Image: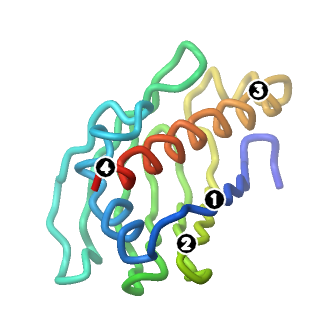
Amino acid sequence: MSLTEFHLITQWTIDAPVEDVWRELSTPEAWPEWWSSVKRVSLLREGDEHGVGAVRRLEWVTALPYELIFNVETVRVEPLSLIEGRASGELDGIGRWTLEREGPRCRVRYDWIVQVTKPWMITLSFILKPIFRWNHGVVMERGRRGLVRRLARV
């Protein structure tokens, strides 16, 4: 793995049925309503009946003083269990949501396997890699908390 590549894994256990978690994660246009780090999601191209082929532009606010904008094309969907997208732009790589039923709860795993592409990130990645990892953790924790609050209201 190069200094500009990251394989970040996030795991959540959510006290909600898989179907409810799936509904929220599979509708990214609504993420800004509950995920404070997601500034905007714009649908650029529709996908098929499962969303495969859809392209969205995601604009993120991070815990650090920078924003990220990249497109994600949905490349694989297994209803109620997996959503995989290919990111391109300021980050390039793969993001994969995996959901698993655990009794009345849902186990969520997110794999984010990307390379940074911003010149300053590439130049400073050898120093900033631990900080980028921390930043990703903060962004994902904001998502977990927002999702829990959202599901408690539904």
Are the residues at dot 2 and dot 1 in contact (C-beta closer than 8 Å)? Answer: no
> Which residue sits at x=31%, y=49%?
153
Tell me the CA gap for discs 4 and 3. 33 Å
Q: Is the residue marked by circle 1 packed among few (<14), some (14-19), or many (20+) residues within 10 Å?
A: some
Q: Give the SS element for disc 1.
A: strand
Look at label 2 and name its amino acid: Cys
The residue closer to the viewer here, 61 or 7, is 61
**Which residue in the structure is indicated by mark 4?**
153
The residue closer to the viewer here, 81 or 125, is 81
Tell me the CA gap for discs 4 and 1. 19 Å
Q: Which label belongs to residue 106? A: 2
- The colour scheme used here is rainbow
Tell me the CA gap for discs 3 and 2. 29 Å
**Which residue in the structure is indicated by mark 3?**
131
Q: Which label belongs to residue 12? A: 1
Nearest to the eye among marks 4 and 2: give it. Answer: 4
Tell me the CA gap for discs 1 and 3. 21 Å
Q: Give the SS element for disc 3.
A: helix
> Which residue sits at x=78%, y=25%?
128
Look at label 3 and name its amino acid: Ile
Look at label 1 and name its amino acid: Trp
